Amino acid sequence: MALGKLYGIGVGPGAPDLVTLRAYNLIRSLPVLAVPRPNPYASSLAFRIMSPHIDPEHKQEHLFLEFPMTKDPEILIPAWNKAFAEIETVLKRGEDIGFVTQGDPFLYSTFIYVHDTLKEKYPELSIEVVPGVSSVMAVPIVAGMPLVDGQERLAVIPASYGLESIRRALQDFDAIVLMKVSSVIEGLITLLEEEGLLDAAYYVERATTDEQRIVRDLRELRGNRCIYFSMVVINKKTRSGVLKGHKSAEVSHGHHA
Ligand SMILES: C[S@@+](CC[C@H](N)C(=O)[O-])C[C@H]1O[C@@H](n2cnc3c(N)ncnc32)[C@H](O)[C@@H]1O
């Protein structure tokens, strides 16, 4: 029997009305939806986002798959293999399955491992990925802070990678989006203080959800635990507005977007 089709469905940063129409239609119509979660006791943000869109009249299976938040291969590899096997079972039944993922599926998402593993194992597998509004886009919007303009250079970095790489990025880029900041927040505040960039930074957690929190003075975060769904953005703004006061060729010809 032909394999079913695998969909990677981005459901956006948190607000259910930031789900795209394409994702909405798939959430309501696919026979099986796979929902990643870190463990059986944790709630899945992706599931909370898509829940209001589920069609109660449509018969649909929800497959909760465990993707533990650890780098320990002894825990990770068996858990992933189990999750992949459950997806394969559905595909081998000839049924389509949608793997829902928070934000965008190709940006630091568990879906990437599912995609790469199954694509390698089944080169004939049909895969469709539905982009989602990423937190990288949503966080500056909720903070009302334009991200980059003109000649500015943007870097997106998992902060958990280490403070030294952040220090280098602060030299080379104009706007830096730091994902997964929760474990390094104290060191990050000290680093930004040393670099004189504390006032250029802001912190947002659970952007676009009912529990959204925006902190414009990072010093307030000292001594507090940060949650996983949190981000720090640094806007140096030393190069922004390069066109201010200049009339570009496009503007004078009326083609400027
Ligand atoms: C595994 S990555 C997933 C990113 C996701 N695929 C995306 O496109 O937004 C998780 C990290 O994304 C960031 N993040 C995701 N959603 C967020 C939100 N609503 N508010 C703030 N940060 C968020 C946090 O930095 C979190 O540690």
Image (cartoon, helix red, strand yellow):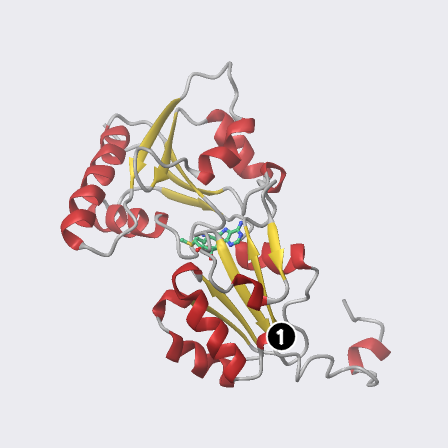
Q: Is residue 240 left or right of residue 56?
A: right
Number of dots carrying numbers: 1
* Residue 112 percent across, percent down from the top left: 34, 52
Front in this rendered view, residue 152 or 167: 167
Which image quarter is the N terminus in? top left
The quadrant where residue 107 appears: bottom left
Which image quarter is the C terminus in? bottom right
Q: Residue at x 64, y 72 (%)?
A: 148
Q: Residue at x 20, y 49 (%)?
A: 76
Is ligand 1 less than 8 Å from the beta carbon at label 1?
Answer: no
Toward the front, the furthest residue is 223
Toward the left, the furthest residue is 74
* Residue 141 percent across, percent down from the top left: 66, 57
Q: Residue at x 39, y 24 (%)?
A: 31
Front in this rendered view, residue 51 or 162: 162
Question: What amino acid type is highlighted by mark number 1?
Answer: Ala
As drawn, 226 above or below 165: above
Q: Residues within 10 Å of mark 1 (few under 14, many from 20)?
A: some
As drawn, 106 above or below 148: above
Q: Is residue 213 left or right of residue 116?
A: right
Front in this rendered view, residue 36 or 126: 36
Question: Pointer 1: what residue?
Answer: 200
* Residue 68 percent across, percent down from the top left: 27, 45
As drawn, 69 above or below 169: above
Q: Residue at x 68, y 66 (%)?
A: 146
At mark 1, the secondary structure is helix
Q: Is residue 84 left or right of residue 191?
A: left
* Residue 145 percent across, percent down from the top left: 68, 64
